[in-house]
Amino acid sequence: MRMVFLGPPGAGKGTQAARLMRRHGIPQLSTGDMLRAAVAAGSAVGLKAKAIMEAGGLAPDALVVGIVAERIVEPDAAKGFILDGFPRTVAQAEALDLMLETKGMALDAVLELEVDPKVLVERIEKRAAETVASGGTVRPDDRPDVLARRLKAYREQTEPVSRYYAESGRLKTIDGMSPIDRVSEGIDGALGIATEFARQA
Ligand code: AMP
């Protein structure tokens, strides 16, 4: 199963992708995690992405497409993968289609979690407060000013990606405002699989 997970920062993609990963035994490939690892390692990719990420902007398409192309051919992705945070521009979505086509592959599902923008800010503020309370370090790009820029980048550059998939009839939108298990149920429904999150009657 090869999947793309779309949704703004704070929509719950990470949580839901982690559940799908456990359930289907396929890796969750987060470009944000890959870029943060590259920054931490001080690699050439990391050096290029660091300042952009800190400012809440998007890393260059070619750079991100390059790391995804290398990642999806790793042995653990042979059975499939869940792309989390990629594609974030229409150019990336087109590059992904081409990349998969040349490998004789295609996406099985494109899921989008839809959440009210006001709730996103609340969720990310909560995530930051919980991190501080547990003695951790808040992600620099979860600070309010940077978050505002990330949400703007999402509206301007990533919402067209939803339209790109919708136009080719591949987009399945799920309400991301419900409790976590209900969202998981919605995802199972969209994938046409029996849910293991059915509510108690
Ligand atoms: P995330 O963890 O998905 O919120 O990503 C954190 C940051 O990494 C984003 O704000 C961007 O600066 C960068 N990033 C992650 N994925 C992409 C992508 N597909 N294209 C461009 N930049 C990305």
Image (spheres, rainbow, N blue to C red):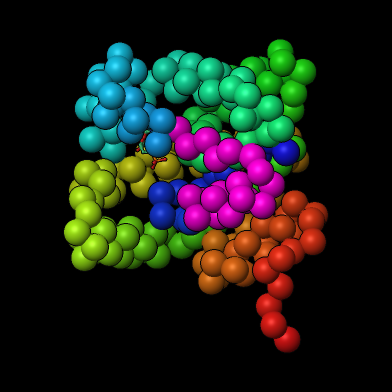
Q: Position of residue 108 (x, y in %)?
A: 74, 37
Dominant SS type (magenta): helix
In the image, the segment drawn in magenta is 13-31
Quadrant where the C terminus is found in the figure? bottom right
Q: Residue at x 48, y 16 (%)?
A: 66
Q: Would you identify the image quadrant in which residue 72 lies? A: top right
Q: Quadrant of ligand 1?
A: top left
173 sits to left or right of 92: right
> Relative to residue 144, is residue 76 depicted above or below?
above
| Badge count | 0
Q: Position of residue 165 (x, y in %)?
A: 66, 37
Q: Residue at x 45, y 33 (%)?
A: 31
> Relative to residue 8, is residue 85 depicted above or below?
above
Q: Position of residue 138 (x, y in %)?
A: 23, 51
Residue 14 inside the magenta-drawn segment: yes
Q: Give whichever of 195, 13 is nearer the camera.
A: 195
Q: Position of residue 56 (x, y in %)?
A: 28, 38
> Relative to residue 11, is residue 34 depicted above or below?
above
Residue 186 inside the magenta-drawn segment: no
Q: Residue at x 52, y 35 (%)?
A: 29
78 sits to left or right of 60: right
Q: Residue at x 62, y 69 (%)?
A: 182
Quadrant where the N terminus is found in the figure? top right
Q: Give whichever of 12, 78 is nearer the camera.
A: 78
